[in-house]
Image (cartoon, rainbow, N blue to C red):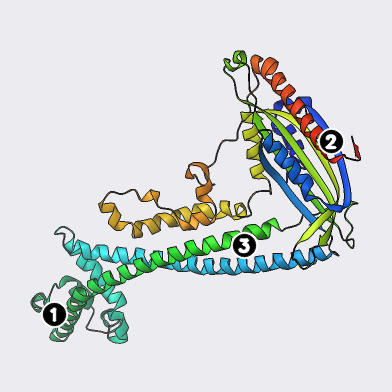
Amino acid sequence: MAFTSVDGLIKEVSPYYKKKGAPEGEHKLVYDAVSESLEPVYFWILDLMEDMGFSVEKLIDNFSSAPGSGHFGELGQRTTILQQQGTKILGDINNVMRSILNLVYDLKEFKIRLGAYDDLNSPGKREAAILSLKQIWMDKVDINKGNSSIKAMALGQAGFVTLIDAFLVAKDEKDAEKIDLNDRVKRLLISRIQEFNLWLNQSENELRKRYEIEKSYLKSQVNSLKIYSRWAKPYLKAAQQLEQKEQGKNPDFVKTFDTIILELTLLGKAQVSLSPELSALKSRKYYKCVLVDFYFRGIPRKIAQQSHYAFGGRAEVTFRAYTLNEEELAKLNEEMNKSDLTDVLSLIDGSTTESLEQLQADINSFLDEKKEDKKEDSSKDVNPILALFGYYEKKGGKSSGDKKKPIEVAKENFVEREHLRPFAAEEATKITYDIFDYFKKAHDMASYT
């Protein structure tokens, strides 16, 4: 990450806190009870904040188990299973993607070929279409005869130099009879003209059948990709969530101890209710924010005859009060999305979305051919390929390739600086202390600073 804590990030994105430095108010308490579970500490504070009208988000959720602990071994097995299953499904997705690519390129070639057949019914294009199809017949069909093919005989045997030109000029057997050629070349030409006309009548029907069959197969493969995408995403997300944070030189973390370190951060925000006088002023919305950092150093205890653990130990909880306007909150979210706390799928989103968008245009061009006659908007169709990478979860359906201008936090005007910010800061300071005080009294903490 580019930052070590959300507290530090707020001080970076907010011009106000860049200058001020410290939060509006900060309180810390320690709860140390090895024999009791740590979960009630977290959920008690979470429920209290929600009951007091805050909209609460979890911004950080990291953990580290000591390599020598039983919890590390069991969690490692689960992570390995998730990674293996996700990798297997990704392999299936790659195979389907390869099949779709091949189908798309085959269908493009078929479409070009069918374009020549369509031109046969156009008086102005018929002659060019016939010449094009004759070239295809010589390259794809007649060439299989080896040394007796038209090109091989015309280029390699004396007396047949005019065979290619005569074949391209002659329209049918009667036309071939009129051409001034020796009898040996003329007999060969008539037989090849007959073969070409027979192929011309049959190949169009076969090619159109093959075209429709491959379009149906393409649709089937796209649907399969959609299914695989839905299956893969939960495994990939779960495996990423079970990744442990490197603790480095943290003295609380000893490799052979039966220890776990948990780091959690909650951000609660509530819009400040202004007086009628202040509400009448045109300004940005201001929010009173409570940032709660949890640092748990626990001892995992496996519950008897069950597969999960309980964590007792020491909890350090820090409460900080902030006042942020709507632009600062948006900037905070923008910076958080740039960090490695985001979904694991975002790691490959940028390198895949652009190419997948191009592929989707080709897929729609084949699957929506009938819809084009009804002038339906094919852009409304959901692309399962892009869905795998969270493309449609983005606001407005914009791809990650679309460059968005970074959010700029404007300077505060006089009213915001002298009235709104101080009023909101007072509100944030008071309610942060109330949350701290309620929790402290309810749990009778041993000490706080």
Q: Is residue 235 visible?
A: yes
- Marks 1 and 3, how far apart in space? 73 Å
Quadrant (top left/top right/bottom left/bottom right) for the C terminus? top right
Q: Residue at x 74, y 45 (%)?
A: 43
The residue that label 3 is drawn on is: 235
Amino acid under disc 2: Lys
Give the Cα distance between marks 1 and 2: 112 Å
Q: How far apart are marks 2 and 3 (CA)?
A: 42 Å
Number of the front mark, 1 or 2: 2
Query: In this picture, is 263 found above or below 329?
Result: below
Q: Which of marks 1 and 2 is nearer the N terminus?
A: 1
Pick whichever, 104 or 433, lies toward us. Answer: 433
Question: Mark 2 or 3, which is nearer the eye?
Answer: 2
Which quadrant of the structure image shows residue 448? top right
- Check disc 3: other Cα within 10 Å, few if <14, some if 14-19, many if 20+: many
Q: Residue at x 35, y 59 (%)?
A: 367
Give the labeled residue for mark 1: 181
Is residue 242 rendered to the left or right of residue 171?
A: right
The three-letter amino acid code for the residue at tag 1 is Leu
Taking the image as shown, residue 440 lies to the left or right of residue 158, namely right
Q: Where is residue 412 in the image (x, y as percent from the top left)?
A: 65, 20
Q: Mark 2 points at which residue?
A: 441
